[in-house]
Image (cartoon, rainbow, N blue to C red):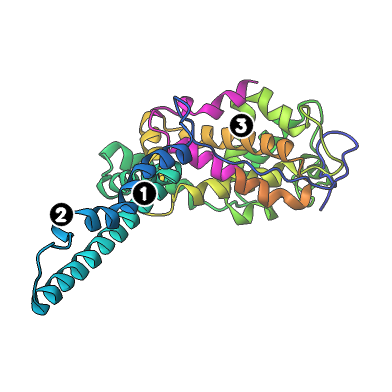
Amino acid sequence: MLHHNHHHHHLFQSHSRHHHHHLQFAFSKPLKDPRSLSRKFTSGYWRWTRDLPTYFSKSKRYRISPFPVDDDETRWRQKNEEDDQAWANNLAHVVSQWSQCCTNAMVGSRSWIGALLSRSSKNRQNDKILNFCMSPLQEQRLQRLQERLQVPFDETRLDHQEALRALWRASFPDIELKGLISEQWKDMGWQGPNPSTDFRGCGFISLENLLFFARTYPASFNRLLFKRYGKRAIWEYPFAVAGINVSFMLIQMLDLCSAKPKCLPGINFIKLLSEDEEAFDVLYCIAFEMMDAQWLAMRASYMEFNEVLQVTRTQLERELSLEDIHRIQDLPAYNLLYQ
C-alpha cells in the first residue's frame, strides 16, 4: 500500500532520474599520448622495411658481373636473386605485422593494463575463496546467526509480541499503541494493520534488525523513519517494509544459508563476525543508511526501490571486498550512522 507523505513516513511518487556511476582508474602520473609513442616507435621500422628491397638490389651480391657468363649461370643468379627478393619481402611483411602488434598494444595500453589488473584481482579473490577455512569461533558464531535465520515470526509467541511493541515504543514513544493489529502500523510503513503478514518473507530476524537499529542508533533510525534529511519525493518508500527487504538482501549477499560462504564479501563478513558477534545487526544499520543515501542520490520514486536496493548491494559488496577491513567500523559507510 502506498502512503502519501503528509507527515513523515509515507511512500512517494515522482519521475525518477537515473544517474549512472562509472569507475575510473586513477594513475599517479599522467600518461603520454600512446599514439605519439606508437608513431615514434614505428617510424624507424617503417623506414627500415621500406628500404629492404633497395638494400638487397644494391648489394654487391646482386650486381651483374661485367664478365660474360653462360645461360645456366645467369638463370642460377636470377633464381637466387628472386628467392632472396621474396625472402626480403616476407621479412618486411613479418616486421611490419610485428610493428603493428606493438603499436596496438601501446595504443590500448590502458585497457590492457586494466584488464590485466582485473584478472589478477579475480585470481586473488578466487584463491581466497578456495583457501578460506573458518576458525572454531567463526564456525560457532556463523551457526548462531544461521539459527536466528531459521526462526519465523510467530504472532502467538509472547516474546515476539513484546518485540513488536518495543519497536513501536522506540519509534513513537509519545503515542500509545492501540493493539498489535491496528491501522497505526501503517504510519511506520507496514503494508497493512497486521505487521506479522510482512514478516513472513524474512522471519523474526528482520524484526530484530529493526529493533536493534532503533535502540543502538536512535538518531539515525528516527532520521530515516521520519525522512528528515534530503529532498524527498511525493511518494516515499515504506520504512518498515524497506527494512525487511534490506535484511533479506544481506542474507543473500553474504551467502549466510550455506555451510561456508562462497563469495568474498561473505568470507570477509565472517572475519568481521569473529571480531563482533553483532556484526550482522550493525551491517544492517549501515546498509539501511546506504540505501537511503542512494535513494536520494538517484531521486528515486517508489517504483525504483528494487533498483536502489541493487545499487546499494553492489556498493556494499565493494566495501566488504576491501583489503583493509578488519572490523565492522572500518567500512567507509559506517560513518553514515553518525552524520
Of callouts 1 and 2, the N-terminal one: 1
Whether residue 219 sits left or right of residue 93 in the image: it is right
State the SS at label 3: helix
For badge 3, the amino acid type reads: Phe
Position of residue 53 relative to residue 3, above or below, is below
Whether residue 182 sits left or right of residue 281 in the image: it is right
Residue 318, position as x, y percentages in the image: 49, 39
Residue 159 at least partly seen: no
The image quadrant of residue 65 is bottom left
Q: Is residue 336 magenta?
A: yes
What is the spatial separation of the Cα atoms under label 3 and label 1, in whole angstroms? Answer: 69 Å
Residue of label 1: 46
Residue 4, position as x, y percentages in the image: 88, 44
Q: Which residues are magenta?
A: 312-339
Residue 82 at least partly seen: yes
Report the magenta stretch's main SS. helix
Whether residue 51 sits left or right of residue 2 in the image: it is left
Q: Residues within 10 Å of mark 1 (few under 14, many from 20)?
A: some
Q: Please give the name of the residue rendered at 58% of the width and 33% of the height, measured from the top-left corner.
A: 285
Label pair 3/1, CB-CB below 8 angstroms: no
Residue 75, position as x, y percentages in the image: 14, 76
Q: Compare residues 170 and 154 and report the one nearer the observer.
A: 170
What is the spatial separation of the Cα atoms under label 1 and label 2, in whole angstroms? Answer: 24 Å
Circle on res. 60: 2
Residue of label 3: 213
